[in-house]
């Protein structure tokens, strides 16, 4: 991996964010790391809201989009991947704070699962035709030609995105 990728993925969250990551992982909001091999994710085993459409977000940053969409569309399951630990920590902190509000529904965010790692690698573990929408915002921050092989939007990745997308 290039140096910029290692720096971004290796950056540590704040102490408070790391605490939120640990607590929210214990509550089941974080998908365990996938192992190399042919195993496929089972959406009905991962989400308590079974048989819902599944939306995938690659590189959610601070999670602002996911935080809002998950509340607006409780009938959709969201799986999102981020390599940047502070981004994961920021989103899980916001989710935890929202869940602690007295007016909050205890099932709020049951439709959200996070993957702390490379979303492109997660694609190979997703069943074909199982994703209804994919969000990929700001995918190319490295315009230099030398970084071409590290960009998200490459032919192999586009083929995998096409494979996991449902036709409906």
Image (tube, helix red, strand yellow):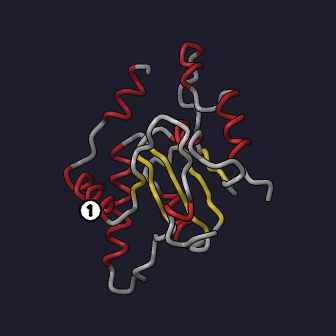
Q: Residue at x 43, y 19 (%)?
A: 2
Pinpoint residue 38: horizontal percent, then vertical percent.
55, 39
Q: Residue at x 39, y 50 (%)?
A: 32
Q: In the figure, is residue 128 to the left or right of 150?
A: right
Q: In the figure, is residue 167 to the left or right of 61?
A: right
Image quadrant of residue 78? bottom right
Labels in figure, total: 1
Work out which residue is located at the far top of the displayed protein and give it.
146
Nearer to me, 129 or 84: 129
Work out which residue is located at the far front of the displayed protein and give it.
38
112 to 62, vertically: above or below: below
Image quadrant of residue 151? top right
Q: Residue at x 33, y 53 (%)?
A: 89
Image quadrant of residue 92? bottom left
Work out which residue is located at the far bottom of the displayed protein and give it.
103
Pinpoint residue 31: horizontal percent, then vertical percent.
42, 53
Q: Residue at x 50, y 71 (%)?
A: 48
């Amino acid at each position: 991996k290039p140096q910029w990728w290692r720096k971004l993925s290796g950056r540590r969250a704040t102490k408070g964010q790391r605490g939120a990551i640990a607590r929210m992982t214990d509550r089941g909001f974080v998908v365990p790391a996938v192992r190399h091999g042919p195993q496929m994710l089972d959406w009905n085993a991962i989400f308590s809201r079974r048989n819902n459409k599944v939306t995938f977000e690659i590189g959610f940053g601070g999670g602002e989009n996911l935080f809002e969409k998950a509340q607006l569309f409780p009938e959709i399951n969201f799986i999102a991947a981020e390599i940047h630990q502070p981004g994961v920590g920021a989103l899980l902190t916001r989710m935890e704070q929202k869940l602690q509000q007295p007016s909050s529904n205890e099932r709020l965010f049951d439709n959200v699962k996070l993957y702390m790692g490379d979303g492109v690698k997660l694609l190979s573990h997703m069943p074909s035709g199982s994703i209804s929408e994919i969000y990929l915002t700001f995918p190319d921050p490295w315009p230099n030609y030398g970084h071409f092989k590290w960009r998200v939007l490459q032919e192999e990745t586009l083929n995998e995105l096409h494979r996991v997308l449902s036709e409906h």
